[in-house]
Image (cartoon, helix red, strand yellow):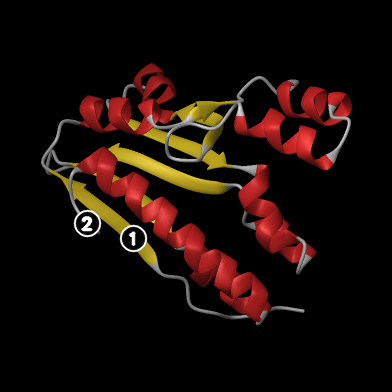
């Protein structure tokens, strides 16, 4: 089966330096890049409330946590191409559950991918695909409603980091 659907791509073009956008973005995130953290908290949780409290302890001010950072610029410098590019996988299991309980296929698109890069013209850009558009192919009203809330949280984080709307 192959589905075709439209994805909305957002880019916030910032007047801020790349390093400042990265610093502002990362300051708003909790950090669970150690792959043992989430499984450890799942195993230690004694109830749903305990699990939620344990996960909330890792949330950043934005409500998101960073699962993975890829510094593409670092490896590109090793092959002779100077670039400032970082990709992130961010999310929150408590946010994901608002969608994934209605359709397990949501798991393809959560956590979310975000890219911060310096364009050839010099400006910093923060880019992502709008979660509600990624979830639209599922045609599930509960998923769509939750994804629209996720859109707003992601947009607010991007605007805070860049100082501009998409």
Where is the C terminus found, in terms of image quarters? bottom left
Question: In the image, which is nearer the foreground, mark 2 or mark 1?
Answer: 2
Q: Earlier in the sequence, mark 2 or mark 1?
A: 1
| Marks 2/1: CA–CA distance | 9 Å
Above or below — where is 13 with respect to 50? Answer: below
Q: Is residue 75 above or below residue 113?
A: above
Image disc number at residue 55: none
Residue 22 at least partly seen: yes
What percent of the width, then of the height, locates residue 68? Answer: 56, 30
The residue under the point 67% across, 59% down is 98
Determine if residue 83 is in view.
no
**Mark 2, residues whose alpha carbon is within 10 Å: few (<14), some, or many (≥20)?**
some
State the SS at label 2.
Answer: loop
Residue at the spot of label 1: 10
- Residue at screen point 60% across, 24% down: 33
Task: Name which residue lies at 70% across and 28% down.
Answer: 54
- Residue 81 falls left or right of residue 131: left
Residue behind mark 2: 165
For this rendering, which residue is in front, 106 or 96? Answer: 96
Question: Nearest the camera: 5 or 83?
Answer: 5
């Amino acid at each position: 089966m192959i589905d075709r659907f439209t994805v909305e791509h957002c880019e916030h073009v910032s007047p801020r330096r790349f390093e400042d956008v990265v610093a502002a973005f990362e300051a708003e995130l909790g950090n669970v890049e150690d792959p043992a953290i989430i499984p450890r908290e799942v195993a230690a949780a004694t109830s749903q409330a305990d699990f939620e409290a344990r996960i909330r302890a890792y949330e950043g001010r934005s409500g998101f946590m960073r699962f993975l950072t890829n510094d593409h610029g670092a490896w590109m410098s090793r092959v002779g191409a100077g670039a400032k590019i970082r990709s992130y996988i961010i999310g929150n299991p408590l946010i994901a559950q608002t969608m994934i309980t209605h359709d397990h296929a949501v798991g393809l698109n959560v956590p979310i991918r975000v890219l911060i890069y310096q364009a050839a013209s010099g400006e910093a850009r923060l880019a992502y695909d709008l979660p509600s558009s990624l979830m639209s192919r599922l045609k599930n009203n509960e998923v769509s409603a939750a994804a629209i809330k996720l859109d707003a949280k992601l947009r607010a984080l991007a605007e805070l980091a860049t100082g501009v709307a998409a």
